[in-house]
């Protein structure tokens, strides 16, 4: 096989047993790699209804067919897939850097971690040699320290590590898995799945060759991508980076502020990408094989947080900034650095603190609950204290580490009204009250609140449609991008590079064929994208999800945008949501309850999974 | 001969290099038709995200690697300064590796003999492919010129700031 390593590694942490199986070509072609392959392996290797923290919930790690080649951004990604401890549905999260490349060179397309180690361990994958190593000395350490210690321990600088921090060890449901110091597989709490398995880290060193099917044409294609990557399609990422969004969203009344109380932020200038670049960004670097370079490394050079450094992206900046009403970038950077050190999903963590602040403002939480903290919107010091508490599961932090949905249930007193999540996953930095196309994508996303599963905000923000209106056929746009995005996440090319595939499915199909030698038409590629979206749906249906789980955060459905801005007064009613869901399901070829029909599954060559919908379709 | 412009080698500008490893990929492909950094003649070091640099053979004067070799497997081309490896003589003992300050001569993972940058017949692939234009083919003299220019520029900026 070209591109693919052709092997799946299975590691049973309970008994240390290691085994190999081949990656079959039909599976490769149907599910591509990355999240697609990971989701397929998950559904085949798990039983319905297992607890996310049970040894019986496998954690799947995958690379993609492009991993380890010179393919820009595709060369370097990896994905984790498991049942999410936050949503109880499909959990998937991707990261880039150098780790995935190394795993591919070690000879694997996927690793399935099963069972649970008796004592803390890390897995050491040294090409064909796989061992469980004692991780006692690493327990309690940050992912960054863990990485250094393992490298030191193994005596090889080129060892790559993905690790969890104290938050993952303590089963914080918003824990992430970090690699290459600043990169996170952040969402859906998979760090806690590692923690539940007593698996502190995965260390990899691979020395094998990666060959592609049509090298000369492939290199020509890559060269063209390099050119495009220096052009306008990626300019945003090379210059201001995603924090560019701050002022854009603010001007459109789409910047969720103070836990979705407002949609504009008076302090936006102070937390803008422009200001960040001028005052804080020390260098912009990139991942292995990438020609874009997007990683904005910020350093705080003065004040109480002097010396703090982290990579900055819009979402966490938003979560700790406008969302918490904080207009101090030094404090935001500090909070993000702490998330890296504890191994917390910074987006979810910031979101939860904003929620807690809202509860405090409404008298649902008091100083008694917060350990004396004045947890008001805008209180940067209290915000940072709360990150520590969540990372350590201390006091109120213990409850908040459960994620916004469970935390609200535990707190009670109507806290649910302020818990902005979908399927249990915390909301991201788009105020969808005035982005009604995006709202469909959010509601149906298989991993919960997520702009990255559909990218439908682009349609609203570009002004291609009336974003304040709900109308028939709108879901068609959403579906198109969803299908494209599942392919992007399965080939594991970086989403920031999506603009360089001018012909979308055609370019991606060609890319795939050049690397793997497996012929794939643009149409088949699109179908694979649709298949993977149906697969995500099937997993959730198997876990008991219904139409009711395609919901929107409470504030989005109850509180019209109050600010004097273009989106004033906008929100989404239940009727509108129902209308959108009907439209979406119909376009997907699903029933009115959102269930893929056996005919649909047959068309997508997924008959083997049709058992999941059996008996669930009402006549 | 002995022109000041002779003996050029591949050097990366740490200010520009982002540690993306494209040079490693293309070098291993050019030389061995596979992607594998272990088979690249140029190697990237990324100490943390802020410090990256790639390194290839510097074509040293009186090359220490050549001197160190106990089997006379290494010679330095008089014309170009490139280190030539006689694969029949080399037994992979590693003395040259120890002698090189840059880690620029290394053992081939399969052939078990050393290999190093040969400048791709004067058309360095890594220079052509580096997406950051961080690589250049320079002589020690032009390298020093560059360093002087950037130092003066910095000093100048500092004095004008005050
Ligand atoms: S290709 Fe250029 S930027 Fe990338 S690592 Fe090599 S020298 Fe540095
Ligand atoms: S291999 Fe090392 S010692 Fe030999 S010439 Fe090159 S840089 Fe100098
Ligand atoms: S000049 Fe050629 S051989 Fe030398 S490092 Fe660059 S690509 Fe490799």
Image (cartoon, coloured by chain):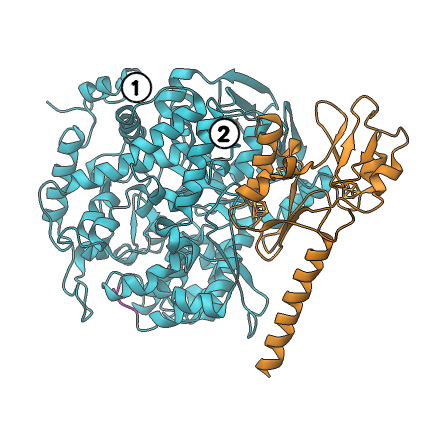
Residue at x 66%, y 40% (from the top left corner): B42
> Is residue A389 part of the magenta span, yes or no?
no
For mark 2, does the 10 Å Cα neighbourhood hold few (<14), some (14 to 19), or many (20 or more) residues?
many
The vertical placement of A567 against A378, above or below, is: above
Please determine whether, in this image, residue B96 is positioned above or below residue B51. Answer: above
Camera-side residue: A264 or A407? Answer: A264
Chain (cyan): A
Picture residue at 47% right of the left edge, 22% below the top? A213
Q: Main secondary structure of the magenta part?
A: loop
The residue positioned farthest toward the front in the image shown: B1
Horizontal arrangement in the rendering, residue A211 relative to residue B117 (left or right)? left
Observer able to see residue A85: yes
Badge number at residue A55 = 2
Q: Which mark is residue A535?
A: none
Left or right for A532, reference B158: left
| Residue A65 visible in the snapshot | no
Residue farthest along the right direction in this orientation: B70
Q: Which residues are magenta?
A: A261-265
Q: Which chain corresponds to the colour orange?
A: B
In depth, the one of A94 and A296 nearer the eye is: A296
Question: Do the residues at pointers 1 and 2 share their chain?
Answer: yes
Whole-percent x, y for residue A119 in the image: 63, 35
- Total marks shown come to 2
Circle 1 — which element?
Answer: helix
Residue indicated by mark 1: A609
Q: Earlier in the sequence, mark 1 or mark 2?
A: 2
- From the viewer's perspective, tell me whether residue A503 is left or right of residue A575: right
- Location of residue B115 (image quadrant): top right
Tell me: residue A329, above or below residue A437: below
- Image quarter (top left, top right, bottom left or bottom right) of the C terminus of chain A: top left
Q: What is the chain identity of the residue bearing mark 1?
A: A
């Amino acid at each position: 096989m070209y591109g693919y390593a052709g092997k799946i590694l299975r590691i049973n942490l309970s008994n240390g047993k290691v085994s190999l199986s081949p990656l079959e070509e039909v599976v490769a072609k149907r599910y591509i790699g990355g999240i697609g392959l990971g989701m397929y392996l998950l559904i085949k290797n798990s039983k319905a209804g297992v607890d996310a923290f049970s040894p019986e919930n496998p954690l799947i790690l995958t690379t993609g067919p492009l991993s380890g080649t010179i393919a820009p951004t595709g060369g370097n990604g990896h994905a984790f897939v498991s049942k999410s401890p936050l949503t109880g549905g499909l959990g998937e999260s991707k990261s880039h850097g150098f780790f995935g490349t190394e795993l591919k060179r070690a000879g694997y397309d996927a690793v399935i971690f099963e069972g649970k180690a008796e004592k803390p361990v890390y897995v050491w994958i040294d090409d064909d040699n796989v061992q469980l190593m004692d991780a006692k000395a690493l327990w309690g350490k940050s992912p960054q320290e863990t990485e250094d210690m393992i490298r030191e321990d193994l005596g090889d600088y080129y060892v790559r590590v993905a690790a969890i921090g104290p938050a993952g060890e303590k089963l914080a449901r918003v824990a992430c898995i970090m690699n290459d110091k600043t990169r996170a597989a952040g969402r859906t709490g998979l760090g806690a799945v590692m923690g539940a398995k007593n698996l502190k880290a995965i260390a990899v060193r691979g020395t094998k060759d990666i060959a592609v099917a049509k090298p000369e044409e492939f290199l020509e294609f890559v060269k063209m991508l390099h050119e495009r990557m220096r052009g306008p399609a990626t300019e945003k990422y090379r210059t201001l980076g995603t924090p560019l969004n701050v002022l854009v969203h603010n001007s459109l009344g789409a910047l969720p502020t103070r836990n979705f109380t407002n949609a504009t932020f008076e302090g936006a200038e102070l937390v803008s990408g422009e200001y960040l670049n001028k005052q804080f960004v020390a260098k912009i670097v990139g991942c292995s094989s990438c020609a874009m370079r997007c990683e904005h490394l910020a350093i705080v050079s003065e004040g109480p947080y002097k010396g703090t450094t982290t990579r900055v992206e819009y979402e966490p900046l938003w979560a700790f900034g406008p969302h918490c009403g904080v207009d101090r970038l030094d404090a935001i950077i500090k909070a993000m650095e702490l998330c890296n050190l504890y191994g917390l999903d910074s987006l979810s963590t910031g979101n939860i603190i904003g929620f807690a602040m809202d509860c405090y403002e409404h008298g649902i939480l008091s100083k008694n609950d917060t350990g004396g903290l004045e947890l008001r919107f805008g209180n940067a010091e209290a915000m940072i204290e709360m990150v520590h508490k969540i990372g350590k599961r201390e006091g109120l932090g213990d409850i908040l580490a459960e994620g916004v949905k469970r935390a609200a249930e535990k707190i009670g007193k109507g806290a649910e009204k302020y818990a902005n999540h979908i399927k249990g996953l915390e909301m991201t930095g788009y105020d969808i009250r005035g982005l009604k196309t995006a709202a469909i994508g959010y509601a149906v996303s298989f991993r919960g609140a997520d702009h990255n599963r559909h990218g439908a905000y682009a349609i609203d923000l570009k002004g291609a449609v009336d974003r304040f209106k709900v109308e028939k056929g709108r879901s068609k746009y959403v579906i198109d991008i969803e299908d494209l995005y599942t392919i992007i996440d399965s080939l594991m090319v970086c989403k920031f590079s999506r603009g360089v595939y001018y012909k979308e499915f055609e370019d991606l199909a060609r890319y795939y064929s050049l690397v793997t030698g497996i012929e794939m038409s643009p149409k088949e590629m699109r179908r694979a994208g649709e298949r993977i979206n149906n697969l995500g749906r099937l997993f959730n249906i198997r876990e008991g999800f219904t139409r009711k789980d395609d919901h929107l955060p409470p504030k989005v459905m109850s509180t019209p945008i109050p600010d004097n801005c273009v989106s004033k007064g906008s929100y989404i009613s239940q009727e509108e949501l129902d209308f959108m869901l009907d439209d979406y399901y119909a376009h997907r070829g699903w029933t009115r309850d959102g269930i893929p029909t056996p005919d649909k599954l047959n068309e997508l060559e997924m008959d083997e999974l049709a058992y999941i919908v059996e008996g669930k379709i009402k006549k | 001969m002995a022109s000041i412009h002779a003996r050029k080698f591949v050097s990366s500008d740490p200010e520009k290099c982002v540690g993306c490893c494209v040079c490693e990929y293309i070098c291993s492909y050019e030389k061995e038709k596979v992607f594998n950094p272990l088979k690249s003649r140029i190697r990237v070091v990324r100490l943390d995200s802020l410090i990256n640099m790639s390194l290839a053979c510097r074509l040293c004067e009186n090359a220490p690697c050549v001197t160190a070799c106990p089997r006379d497997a290494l010679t330095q081309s008089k014309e170009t300064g490139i280190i030539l490896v006689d694969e029949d003589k080399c037994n992979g003992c590693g003395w040259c590796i120890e002698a090189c300050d840059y880690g620029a001569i290394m053992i081939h993972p399969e052939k078990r003999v050393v290999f190093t940058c040969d400048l791709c017949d004067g058309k360095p692939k890594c220079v052509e492919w580096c997406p950051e234009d961080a690589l250049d083919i320079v002589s020690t003299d032009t390298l020093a010129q560059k360093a002087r220019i950037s130092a003066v520029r910095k000093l100048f900026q500092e004095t004008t700031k005050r």
